[in-house]
Image: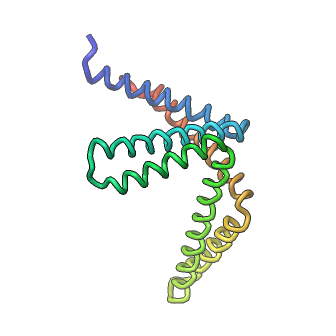
Amino acid sequence: MTTALEMEKKYVNGVFLLGGIISVIFGILLITRTQGVIEVIMLLLGLWWLIQGLFNILAIFIDKSQWGLKLIGGILGVIAGLLVLNFPLVGGAVYFGVMTIIIGVIGLLIGAVSIVAAFQGGGWGAGLFGVVSVIIGFFLIFNVFGALNIFVWIFAILLILQGAVAIFLGVTQRA
């Protein structure tokens, strides 16, 4: 006779296994069919934004509190959703490009703080870390497309590794 706890463990193991398989597949597809996978992800994101925007607008009729924020959020969601659904690759490039520049600026700031800390007694390790962070920050800001390619590969490899771990857990954990 199977107890509720055993059933729950089997369910969790199954979720690990399924999630791991999906992660490995997406990781491999991201490496082999980068443009297609990014397009699918952006289409899903555009659909999500469109639906969320419509629900924000409909929420005004249910609950009138903060109607201005709901209206603005709804309109922005609908516009962003329609734009991304019509131009998924452009949306992906813009989204990932902006994120790359933001990460680059953060890298510059971290580097600057570390360099200042090095001159205030933090040691040469902090200074070296700061210089490397500044170099990486400049690379990300001034070579967005090169950085995007690197990020896609890193993300794909992480998906494959995470998927492998999840598959391992799903198969080896006892119910």
The C terminus - image quarter: top left
Does residue 78 appear to the left or right of 40 in the view shown? left
Q: Quadrant of residue 96?
A: bottom right
Residue 17 at x, y percent in the picture: 49, 27
Identify the residue shown where x is 72% and y is 36%. 33
- 161 or 108: nearer the viewer: 108
- 27 or 42: nearer the viewer: 42
Does residue 101 appear to the left or right of 145 in the view shown? left
Q: Quadrant of residue 44?
A: top right
Residue 111 at x, y percent in the picture: 58, 75
Residue 151 at x, y percent in the picture: 65, 52
Give the residue furthest to the front: 61
> Residue 154, relative to residue 24: is it above or below?
below
Colouring: rainbow
Identify the residue shown where x is 46% and y is 32%. 169
> Residue 54, relative to residue 7: is it above or below?
below
Give the residue furthest to the top: 1
- 42 or 66: nearer the viewer: 66
The N terminus - image quarter: top left
Residue 51 at x, y percent in the picture: 46, 39
Identify the residue shown where x is 58% and y is 41%. 159
Q: Quadrant of residue 106?
A: bottom right
